[in-house]
Amino acid sequence: KALDEEEVHFEFTDQLSPGVVKVNHPFLYVIMPMRTS
């Protein structure tokens, strides 16, 4: 899904932890890491 926002914040701690995408909506998007090997 495309976001129609002018400002988007990405928060990451390291490569194996979940990340967070914050926008000006009442929603919070979580990005989960995947190991492919």
Image (cartoon, grey):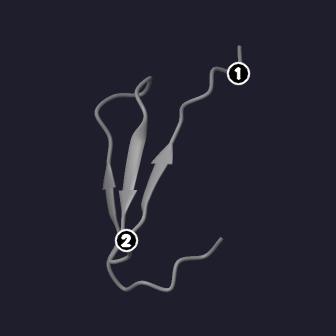
Q: How far apart in space, not on screen, are marks 2 and 1 (Cα)? A: 32 Å
Say what amino acid the circle numbered 1 marks.
Answer: Thr
Contact between marks 2 and 1 (CB within 8 A): the answer is: no
Residue 12 x/y as whole percent: 32, 41
Residue appearing at x 44%, y 23% in the figure: 16
In terms of secondary structure, where does tag 2 sit? Answer: loop
In terms of secondary structure, where does tag 1 sit? Answer: loop
- Quarter of the image for residue 22 reads bottom left
- Quarter of the image for residue 23 reads bottom left
Q: Give the crowd class for mark 1: few <14, some 14-19, many >=20 residues within 10 Å.
A: few
| Most foreground residue, 15 or 32 | 32
- Quarter of the image for residue 6 reads bottom left
Residue 34 x/y as whole percent: 62, 27
User: In the image as oriented, which residue stretches furthest toward the front?
Assistant: 26
Residue appearing at x 40%, y 42% in the figure: 19
Q: Is residue 33 above or below residue 8?
A: above
Q: Is residue 29 above or below residue 7?
A: above
Q: Give the crowd class for mark 2: few <14, some 14-19, many >=20 residues within 10 Å.
A: few
Say what amino acid the circle numbered 2 marks.
Answer: Pro
For the N terminus, which image quadrant?
bottom right
Residue 3 x/y as whole percent: 53, 77
Determine which residue is flagged by label 1. 36
Q: Is residue 31 above or below residue 8?
A: above
Residue appearing at x 43%, y 34% in the figure: 18
Determine which residue is flagged by label 2. 26
For the C terminus, which image quadrant?
top right
Residue 9 x/y as whole percent: 31, 63
**Which numbered disc flags the more N-terminal residue, 2 or 1?**
2
